[in-house]
Image (spheres, rainbow, N blue to C red):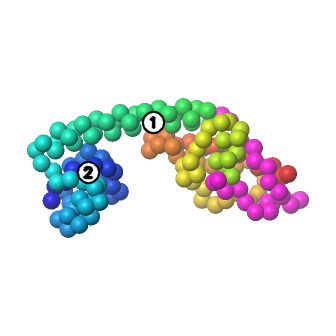
């Protein structure tokens, strides 16, 4: 069954794409939930319009993400946390702490899910944290964790 996607669907396609899906998936999930409509000849024009608007929005989002990256890459964000004499933190610095510190020190509002840490920071010192604001815009945020 060919369907025109009305919104992004993970593993299937993006808004405006005409994709081939199994009949059951299209009939029982995509169409009733409003994620897709059956593809018709008139739907192809609608798909082109959807793709154009998606591309314009994507370009604007990429530009905004690049501006944020230009602000954050040279900055060193300082986070004060309680620590022992050996430099181990009582607790840890999480993604939420990083977002809060970035907001307070630079005025840039990030989403917690845009920060991806393998492990929370548990020691005093300089750390590098990866951030992904857009598929094409990924950068490192430099953190200086100090004992308070």
Q: Quickly name the residue at label 2.
A: 5
Identity of the residue drawn at 83% across and 58% down: 83
Q: Quickly name the residue at label 1.
A: 62
Q: Which mark is residue 111?
A: none
Tag 1: Cα neighbours inside 10 Å, few (<14), some, or many (≥20)?
some
Does residue 141 sit above or below 13 in this rendering? above
Identity of the residue drawn at 56% across and 48% down: 111
For label 2, the SS is strand
Which one is nearer the viewer's eye here, 79 or 6? 6
Quadrant where the N terminus sits is bottom left
Does residue 21 sit above or below 41 in this rendering? below
* Residue 123 visible to an observer of this rendering: yes
Residue 78 lies within the magenta run:
yes
Identity of the residue drawn at 54% across and 31% down: 67
Which one is nearer the viewer's eye here, 107 or 144? 107
Q: Which residues are magenta?
A: 74-96
Residue 12, position as x, y percentages in the image: 29, 56
Q: Which mark is nearer the camera, 2 or 1?
A: 2
């Amino acid at each position: 069954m060919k369907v025109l996607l009305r919104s992004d669907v993970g593993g299937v396609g993006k808004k405006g794409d005409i994709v081939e899906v199994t009949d059951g998936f299209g009939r029982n999930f995509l169409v009733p939930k409003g994620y897709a409509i059956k593809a018709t000849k008139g739907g192809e024009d609608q798909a082109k319009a959807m793709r154009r608007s998606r591309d314009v929005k994507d370009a604007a989002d990429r530009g905004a993400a690049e501006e944020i990256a230009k602000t954050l890459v040279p900055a060193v964000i300082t986070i004060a946390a309680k620590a022992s004499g050996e430099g181990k933190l009582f607790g840890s610095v999480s993604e939420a702490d990083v977002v809060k510190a970035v907001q307070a020190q630079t005025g840039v509002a990030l989403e917690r899910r845009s920060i991806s840490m393998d492990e929370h920071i548990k020691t005093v010192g300089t750390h590098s944290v990866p951030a992904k604001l857009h598929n094409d815009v990924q950068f490192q945020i430099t953190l200086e964790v100090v004992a308070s």
